[in-house]
Image (spheres, rainbow, N blue to C red):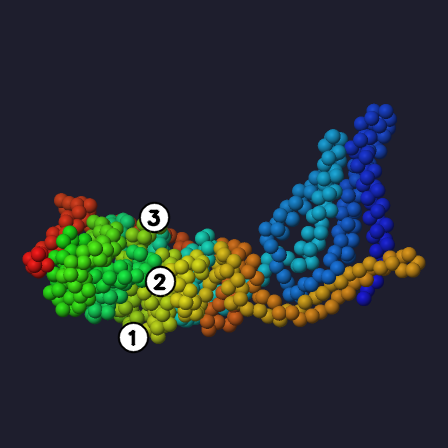
């Protein structure tokens, strides 16, 4: 216990005297100056002295009040010994108010009396309010939390190094999966995604990129290839449905991509689940029947007409006006016939209502995929989806458009699903799959890819705004599996309390030494005042990162963990350094003379429809003849 009786009495006495002097100054400046000077001109010099001494008076009063508040503030203040943080916005506001109030407080004597009458009391009242906040800020020791990052790089042929303001974040093993989560504007793509892409290209990774806002990431890949000279011979392809002048053509349903009927079933599931996301969690009879119908069509073209095995041919067959003729055609293939057995039975039993519901369910879903532009892109063979073929490693950028995401997501998800089947095999080139705004896609069993593909050197990068999006797309159980398998985790500014709490709990807790302050005032029998102050230390378990901190991160600032790192967790402001020269994607599609791209697209669409009609007519309609 420490006693400050003489100091306290002196401060109180000084403060009271200063308050009285402030009152006198206020009266002289606000009320008495004009008529006194007019009546007694010699008093002009006296008022000049008051102005000069008034500045010193107000400064002394402010410092005395701050000292008294520092002695008496808080009867029980608990504070960690380590440097604590303080809300940046509040601290800046307090400092701004102090500067404004201080300026007017030092110049108040220069204003007219009618202004001083209301300005002077407001300044004193403001100081009474601001000083306690300033003392609290001083005690907490600052406004900026300390950065936690590594001081040295761990650069290996497979690692990724992200520069920060004061160090580095080392992703030593990207094959164990990378999660990047942060709200819009947190810097996910610019700070983390762009860095990953640049270093993947520089180190010879083949891979797939889902560019949600094409051509943002496509330009990053193109710039990286030009900047580093492409020493690994990566072939760069772009598939984009919005701008056909900047798109290669790709057939995900090429026969070599469908070795078994199980592959056809999974591809059909991918299409149906993305067309109707409600079927991901709750698959009803109509959705299951629609998936079976689509599987039968895919397998039929795969085995009976492989030269026409494309998604546009499958879609136009499913939309064929006489569905009984299509059923009759499918029965020509034993495996397809087995898949549609229940549908064929319904036709024989004249159950048109039940059958019409199944066919209509599929037709309504796939109609939006039947456009000339999508038919053009998906009926060509510029791109082989054996992405990480050691002899021909590729980079494939899949472009989307936020305004058309519901239309593009089924086919983009299909392409990624087909490619992952081939990428996740031993003996292939090291590769990656980076999904920006990943919950806009549904890829069956993707939650298992980070765990099963790491041994085949496939790095999975999943970028998302919030945990709730993952739960909404995959369900809580699968989202938890995905979070567990994505071992390298980067969290930017969170938009929901639940996500912030999860990040806080993930980082964990630690024992902190807490300094406890206790002050009190007592009066002795003689009437004198005694100030006592107690300082004690204790151990308490506290969160290393509070949820509020996660929700207040600045753009480019991330919290998280990386496996095989020296730090148990990191908190750092990233430093993205874009290339000095950007290489944007320019139109590269060339059409023969005498025609335009639009004409070729329209001709291709008509050709597919005529080919489908010709194929169907090759098979007799046994159901019509039986009528």
Q: Which mark is residue 281?
A: 2
In the picture provided, is 405 more to the left or to the right than 566? left
Task: State the residue in front, 64 or 201.
Answer: 64
Can you give x and y, in whole percent of width and height, for residue 210 in the image? 33, 58
The Cα atoms of the two marked residues, 2 and 3, are separated by: 25 Å
Quarter containing the N terminus = bottom right
Can you give x and y, in whole percent of width and height, for residue 8 in the image? 84, 56
Q: Which mark is residue 403?
A: 3
Q: Select label 2 or label 1 by which is in front.
A: 2
Q: Quadrant of residue 160?
A: bottom left
Can you give x and y, in whole percent of width and height, for residue 148 in the image? 54, 65
Q: Which circle's residue, 3 or 1, is located before the other in the chain? A: 3
Quarter containing the C terminus = bottom left
- Badges 3 and 1: C-beta atoms under 8 Å apart? no
SS class, disc 1 = loop
Residue at screen point 50% across, 60% down? 498
- Badges 2 and 1: C-beta atoms under 8 Å apart? no
Residue 33 seen from this side: yes
Q: Which circle's residue, 2 or 1, is located before the other in the chain? A: 2
SS class, disc 3 = helix
The Cα atoms of the two marked residues, 2 and 1, are separated by: 32 Å
In the picture provided, is 245 more to the left or to the right than 78? left
Relative to 371, residue 225 above or below:
below
Residue 573 seen from this side: no
Residue at screen point 26% across, 66% down? 266
Q: Which residue is mark 1?
A: 426
Label 3 packing within 10 angstroms: few (<14), some (14-19), many (20+): few
Task: State the residue in front, 202 or 503.
Answer: 503
Label 1 packing within 10 angstroms: few (<14), some (14-19), many (20+): few
Can you give x and y, in whole percent of width and height, for residue 535 in the image? 75, 66
Residue at screen point 27% across, 69% down? 422
């Amino acid at each position: 216990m420490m006693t400050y009786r003489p100091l306290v009495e002196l401060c109180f006495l000084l403060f009271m005297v200063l308050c009285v002097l402030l009152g006198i100054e206020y009266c002289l400046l606000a009320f008495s100056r004009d008529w006194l000077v007019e009546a007694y001109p010699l008093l002009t010099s006296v008022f000049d002295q008051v102005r000069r001494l008034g500045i010193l008076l107000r400064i002394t009063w402010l410092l005395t009040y701050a000292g008294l508040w520092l002695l008496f503030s808080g009867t029980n203040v608990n504070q960690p010994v380590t440097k604590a943080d303080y809300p940046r916005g509040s601290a800046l506001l307090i400092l701004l108010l102090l500067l404004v109030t201080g300026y007017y407080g030092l110049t108040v004597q220069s204003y007219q009396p009618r202004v001083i009458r209301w300005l002077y009391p407001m300044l004193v009242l403001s100081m009474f309010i601001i000083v306690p906040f300033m003392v609290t800020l001083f005690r907490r020791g600052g406004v900026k939390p300390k950065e936690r990052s590594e001081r040295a790089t761990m650069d290996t042929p497979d690692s990724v190094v992200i520069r920060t303001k004061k160090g580095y974040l080392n992703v030593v093993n990207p094959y164990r999966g990378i999660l990047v989560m942060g709200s819009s504007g947190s810097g996910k793509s610019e700070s983390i995604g762009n860095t990953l892409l640049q270093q993947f290209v520089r180190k010879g990774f083949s891979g797939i990129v889902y560019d949600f806002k094409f051509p943002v990431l496509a330009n990053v890949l193109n710039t990286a290839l030009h900047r580093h000279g492409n020493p690994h011979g990566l072939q760069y392809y772009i598939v984009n449905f919005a701008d056909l002048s900047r798109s290669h053509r790709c057939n995900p349903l090429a026969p070599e991509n469908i070795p078994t009927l199980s592959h056809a079933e999974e591809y059909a599931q991918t299409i149906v689940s993305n067309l109707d996301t409600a079927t991901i969690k709750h698959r009803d009879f109509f959705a299951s029947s629609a998936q079976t119908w689509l599987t039968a069509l895919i397998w039929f073209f795969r085995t009976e007409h492989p030269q026409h095995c494309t998604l546009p041919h499958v879609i136009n067959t499913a939309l064929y006006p006489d569905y009984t003729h299509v059923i009759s055609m499918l029965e020509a293939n034993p495996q397809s016939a087995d898949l549609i057995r229940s549908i064929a039975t319904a036709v024989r039993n004249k159950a048109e209502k039940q059958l019409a519901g199944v066919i209509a369910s599929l037709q309504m879903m796939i109609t939006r995929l039947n456009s000339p532009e999508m038919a053009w892109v998906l009926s060509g063979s510029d791109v082989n989806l054996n992405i990480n073929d050691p002899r021909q490693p590729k980079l494939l950028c899949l472009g989307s458009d936020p305004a058309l995401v519901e239309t593009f997501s089924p086919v983009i998800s299909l392409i990624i699903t087909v490619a992952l089947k081939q990428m996740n095999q031993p003996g292939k080139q090291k590769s990656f799959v980076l999904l920006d705004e990943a919950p806009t896609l549904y890829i069956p069993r993707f939650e298992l890819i980070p765990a099963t593909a790491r041994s085949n050197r496939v790095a999975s990068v999943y970028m998302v705004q919030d945990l709730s999006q993952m739960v909404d797309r995959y369900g809580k159980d699968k989202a938890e599996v995905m979070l567990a398998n994505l071992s390298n985790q980067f969290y930017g500014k969170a938009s929901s309390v639940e996500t912030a709490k999860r990040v806080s709990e993930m980082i964990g807790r630690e024992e902190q030494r807490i300094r406890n302050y206790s002050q009190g005032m007592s009066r002795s029998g003689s009437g004198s005042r005694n100030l006592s102050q107690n300082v004690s230390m204790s151990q308490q378990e506290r969160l290393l990162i509070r949820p509020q901190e996660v929700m207040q991160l600045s753009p480019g600032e991330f919290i998280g963990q990386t496996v095989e790192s020296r730090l148990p967790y990191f908190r750092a402001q990233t430093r993205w350094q874009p290339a000095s020269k950007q290489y944007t994607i320019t139109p590269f599609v060339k059409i023969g003379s005498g025609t335009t791209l639009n004409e070729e697209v329209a001709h291709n669409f008509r050709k597919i429809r005529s080919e489908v009609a010709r194929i169907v007519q090759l098979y007799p309609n046994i159901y019509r003849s039986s009528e």
